[in-house]
Image: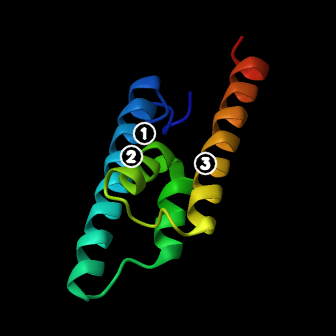
Amino acid sequence: MSDYGFIFTWQFAVLYLIIINLIGFFAMWIDKVKARNGSWRIPENTLFMITFLGGGFGTIAGMYKFRHKTKKLRFTICFPVILLTEIVLVIYALVKYVF
């Protein structure tokens, strides 16, 4: 095992997914509040990056919970596509390398 092998455990992966999805959920909430107040906004690319990094459930849940970005086709299509692609890739990797 390498020096960094201890980081790549199931517990770490689950903790990472919980944290990144909470970040995604709250990023959508913060951006909605900022939009209402006319303040600075979280860049759309940042929201997509959070989704791409594994926060798809959180950003999608936040999008519909706060009714934020739901009229933008770019978000309503791309967020679920990113999430589904990641799920398929994880299932593929598990089947190929674990089972």
Residue mark closest to the camera, 2 vs 1: 2
How far is disc 3 from disc 1 in space, using C-alphas? 16 Å
Query: Of the residues shown, which amino acid type is indicated by label 3?
Result: Pro
Up/down of 44 relative to 39, above or below: above
Numbered disc 3: secondary structure = helix
- What is the x, y in percent for residue 37? 20, 84
Q: Which of disc 1 and disc 3 is earlier in sequence? A: 1
Residue contact at pointers 2 and 1, CB within 8 angstroms: yes
38 vs 59, nearest the viewer: 38
| Quarter in which the N terminus is drawn | top right
Query: Of the residues shown, which amino acid type is indicated by label 1?
Result: Leu
Q: Which of disc 2 and disc 3 is earlier in sequence? A: 2
- What is the x, y in percent for residue 10? 46, 24
23 vs 68, nearest the viewer: 68
Residue on which disc 1 sits: 17
Up/down of 72 relative to 80, above or below: below
Residue on which disc 2 sits: 21
Judge the density around disc 3: few (<14), some (14-19), many (≥20) Cα neighbours within 10 Å.
some
Query: Of the residues shown, which amino acid type is indicated by label 2?
Result: Asn
Up/down of 59 relative to 16, above or below: below
How far is disc 2 from disc 1 in space, using C-alphas? 6 Å
- Residue 2 lies in quadrant: top right
Going by the picture, which residue comes out furthest to the front? 71
- Residue 99 lies in quadrant: top right
Residue contact at pointers 3 and 1, CB within 8 angstroms: no
Q: Residue at x 69, y 26 (%)?
A: 91
- What is the x, y in percent for residue 76? 58, 58
Q: Residue at x 30, y 87 (%)?
A: 40
Residue on which disc 3 sits: 80
Numbered disc 1: secondary structure = helix
Q: Residue at x 46, y 50 (%)?
A: 60
- What is the x, y in percent for residue 65? 33, 50
